[in-house]
Amino acid sequence: MALLTILQYPDPRLHNTAAPIVQVDDSVRSLIADMAETMYAAPGVGLAATQVDVHRQLIVIDVSPTHDQLKVFINPEILESRGASGVEEGCLSVPGVYDKVQRAAWIRVRALDAKGAPFELEAEGLLAVCIQHEMDHLKGKVFVEYLSPLKRNRILTRLRKHEKRAG
Ligand code: NI
């Protein structure tokens, strides 16, 4: 297993669209293991392959307080959604930024698991929000793009300052 580098907003590669995974083979399972390790180490509750510069439809999520309930979604699809929820979100690609985004409160999602078997899951609360957030990454969308231009500009200015200091 290995820790992967997480792309930082506004890296243009975060806007790539992920392609479906045709075969869930050992290379995919090894990517899942690395992504899970990277997510837990960050620490975070979700990570999309896009964020580690792999543009394939794969996300890992663990919203459990014990960090031992890893959920893997390959080629996820939202079949049904209901309600509205605005939970404060953060993102490993946008460190230090937290804000509310309008999301569906309840979703039914279909995906393949780490063995390549299809499954359906109903989710609400933090898990539902997290799935929608990570699925956005696969479409090349970062959560700060839902915020007002004013807020987004403030975030960009702050991240650039940070970058200068780091560089
Ligand atoms: Ni994110």
Image (cartoon, helix red, strand yellow):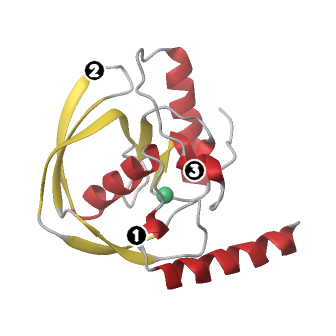
Q: In the image, 106: left or right of 31? A: left
Residue 101 vertical placement versus 138 (above, below)? below
- Pointer 1 residue: 146
Task: Check disc 2: other Cα within 10 Å, few if <14, some if 14-19, many if 20+.
Answer: few
Residue type marked 2? Ala
In what element is the residue under mark 1? helix
From the viewer's side, name the closer residue of 37 and 163.
Answer: 163
Q: Quadrant of residue 153?
A: bottom right
Residue 102 visible to an observer of this rendering: yes
Q: Write the residue at 77% across / 78% down.
A: 161
Residue 38 visible to an observer of this rendering: no
Residue 144 vertical placement versus 73 (above, below)? below
Q: Write the residue at 40% across / 69% down.
A: 146
From mark 3 to mark 1, how far is it between C-alphas? 15 Å
Residue 27: horizontal and vertical position, in percent? 56, 19
From mark 2 to mark 3, how far is it between C-alphas? 28 Å
Task: Check disc 1: other Cα within 10 Å, few if <14, some if 14-19, many if 20+.
Answer: some
Residue 107: horizontal and vertical position, in percent? 17, 52
Residue 14 is marked as: 3
From the viewer's side, name the closer residue of 18 and 29.
Answer: 18
Tag in front: 2 or 1: 1
Q: N-terminal of the two: label 2 or label 3?
A: 3
From mark 2 to mark 1, how far is it between C-alphas? 33 Å
Contact flag, marks 2 and 3 (Cβ < 8 Å):
no
